[in-house]
Amino acid sequence: MDTDVTKTSGKSIPMWVQMLLGMVLGVAAGLAVAPEGIFAVPPDILVPVTEWIMLPARLFIALITMIVMPLVFCSILLAIAESDGFSFLRTTGLRVVFYFVFTTIVAVWIGITLTQTINPAQHVPESWLAGQTAGIETLADAAHQVTAQKSVPQLIAEMIPANPFVALLEQQMLQIVIAAVLAGLALVSMGRKEAEPFLKFCQSVQGICMKIVYGAMMAAPVAVFGFLFRLTVETGPDMLAALSWYIGTVLAGLLLILLFYLVLVTCAGRRNPLAFLRDIRDAQLLAFSSSSSAATMPVSLSTAENRLKVDPEIARLVIPLGTTINMDGTALYQIIVALFLTSLMGIDLTTGQMIMLSVTVVGAAIGSPGTPGVGLVILSSIMTGLGVPPEAIGIILSVDRMLDMCRTVINVTGDLTAAVVMDRWAHEKHSG
């Protein structure tokens, strides 16, 4: 079955061109009707108009989100059940987890080095800074709810879904991944005859999910238009100017991570980096517009198997697992924001605090759900431990959506890079 959800037929316009066109038109339309635009629309009219323009985008995300969890479960289960089982998980599974931890540590190191070198906090105008933290109490409340005090044993125990259906409803990605691993190992230990009906059922579910994604991708350019239109309308030029050094630091860090990935693709994956970027552009554009690595996961999986020609067993394990725990862009962003805000508040971190902050950010990034904006909620709790009030997140809240889009691109690119590297290592092992 053809599962390439980004493929176009005949002489139709390639999907990446359609999405790029949607992005450009969305920005242009947003600039034109924004309060400072040529065809400025009054806010009382602009707000409902934006809501209607965003409707296709919200429907698109809802449709993709609907099938992400069953697709993750079936993909990982089939990858394990159709491979060497325990041996495959022990080699490829452990290797990819250590790989993800390593790249996250590299991302945090890049963020620390850049922030200490550029020091973006010293470039923020004091006149603009006054009053920017007002009205952000709801964010602090959300962070408090998310980070309610739990012991380490409790957190470990909660990794096993006591009720898989609740885990599905609440989009608990890590729990679904663990359930899929356990189910896959159980199927391997069964006889092929007993396991065959359930395997065929999972194959059918996976096929249905990919067909739904294929249909949803037809509306992707319209959804991209809506995402970029709203972003442009909501982000004013004064805000961008005041936080330009902070924004530049984050973008520079994300660019360095991208270059690091291309080195891995070239040296460890033995691929042409430019060809790699060309093959993954559909997934990158969707990640940029949706700000959700989870929503992009079906396209990433299709890209890995059909464009990058990664072994399906490797792709079906690495891509869903990467969507769950591989958040290098988020890790870099969180460390930069933490250092930026502590510097802005005049807080000097000791070496011990810096080390603890780095460890916390690595752990928080690995545990972050791949959904839009969740990094801010987690970051709010981290800042409390450093003496920075959670309300201070309001200083960078207005530009977070734009940076969220950029760091999601890096997260998704990291998943595809890992798939290429793991695929190469697996082939070298078999050929050796």
Image (spheres, grey):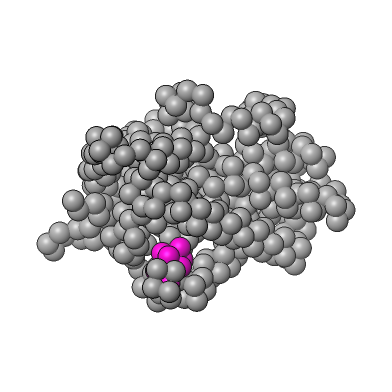
Identify the residue at the far front of this view. Answer: 191
The segment highlighted magenta reads 420-428
Residue at coordinates 70% horizontally, 28% vertically from top-left? 150
Instruction: Give the image quarter of residue 132.
Output: top right
Q: Residue at x 33, y 56 (%)?
A: 312
Q: Farthest residue toward the left?
A: 10
Q: Position of residue 61 (x, y in %)?
A: 37, 38
Q: Residue at x 39, y 73 (%)?
A: 431
What is the tally of numbered marks visible in this picture?
0
From what the image shows, is residue 114 above or below residue 218? below
The image quadrant that residue 114 belongs to is bottom right
Position in image of residue 106 (x %, y %): 64, 62
Q: Is residue 289 visible?
A: no
Task: Indicate yes or no whether the magenta region holds residue 87.
Answer: no
Asked where in the image residue 245 lies, by quadrant, the reply is bottom right
Residue 95 visible in the current orientation: yes
Q: Which quarter of the rendered picture does the C terminus lie within?
A: bottom left
Residue 393: x, y in percent?
68, 40
Q: What residue sits 65% from the left and 58% below the top?
A: 105
Q: In front: 28, or 325?
A: 325
Given residues 75 and 103, the one toward you in this image is 75
Does residue 300 appear to the left or right of 217 in the view shown? Answer: right
Q: What secondary structure is the magenta-colored segment mainly?
A: helix
**Frontmost residue, 101 versus 50:** 101
Please state the horizontal and vertical placement of residue 66, each as a whole percent of the image: 35, 33
Q: Is residue 270 placed above or below 182 in the rendered structure?
A: below
